[in-house]
Amino acid sequence: MGSPSLLLLLVLIVAGALGSWIIGGKEVKPHSRPYIASIQLDGRHVCGGFLVWRKWVMTAAHCVIPRHSPSVRIVLGAHSLKHQEASQQVFSIRESIMHPHFNARTVHNDIRMLELNTSATFNQFVKRIRLPKPNADLPPGVVCRVLGWGDISNFGTIPTELRETQTTVVSRKICKALWVGHVNKDMLCAASLNSTLQGVCSGDSGGPLVCGGRVHGIVSFSGQRCGNRRYPDIYTRISKYISWVHDVLKRF
């Protein structure tokens, strides 16, 4: 039987294929997105996430993150993943709470909460991001940004610095028609409005969709060709899960 570390790597690689990379974006100003988290296996970035409380990071359920694994760590306060920056705070995972109704086939309820082994220290490099109000929805046309360390091309080009791109909310009706039944009311859709490829790609799974200073979505899945407007990127609609998030915080 293979080693637990190798098995976990294979699971995370498959999970990452569901999600996405930052295509057509640009490098952000260092440490200007202090809520972003890099989820790593044996020092390799596999999924994104974001800090929502001192001890809690939110990510996608399809990022299979076990607790108490010495191979897995969460890095906060990072800009470059190539260098060990003084701003970085590194944690192991005490609890990994997947939504009880997550469906790996349909990717419905794609949300997971990760409890850090100790509280993060808030400073200019590490801060939490605000969640949306319960059941808040985004109308078509709202411009948001999505960020991460995922691939920056359809050929697996991997960046070392944090990148982001703008993306525009697409109506759920149009999105349902394009994705033929894969989209429901608990998801958000967004795509580039210009002719260039822009959006998420492999390695961005679990990262934040930020609109108006709040995180409204979690990178869930995208089309086979990253940034293709024919298939908008799909995000977990966080506002539908606020009650569940609060229940998790109370229980743990």
Image: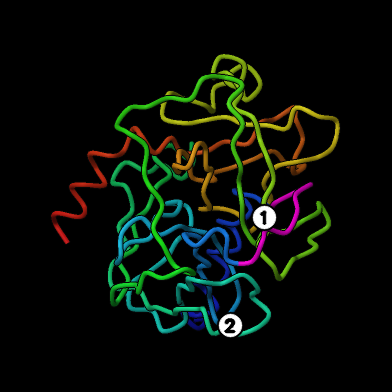
Residue under pointer 1: 202
**Residue at the extreme left of the image, as rendered:** 251
Residue at screen point 34% across, 72% down: 120
Residue 99, image x and y in percent?
32, 47
Residue 101, image x and y in percent?
32, 41
Reply yes or no: does residue 70 show up in magenta: no
Q: State the SS at label 1.
A: loop
**Residue at the extreme front of the image, as rendered:** 124
Depicted 193 relative to depicted 213: above or below = above
**Horizontal relation, residue 167 to residue 55: left or right:** right
**Viewer-proximal residue among 238 and 52:** 52
Q: Name the image quarter holding residue 26.
A: bottom right
Residue 223, image x and y in percent?
69, 38
Q: Main secondary structure of the magenta part?
A: loop
Question: Where does the C terminus fall, quadrant-wise?
Answer: bottom left
Residue under pointer 2: 85
Q: Which residues are magenta?
A: 22-30
Depicted 16 relative to depicted 177: above or below = below
Depicted 232 relative to depicted 14: above or below = above
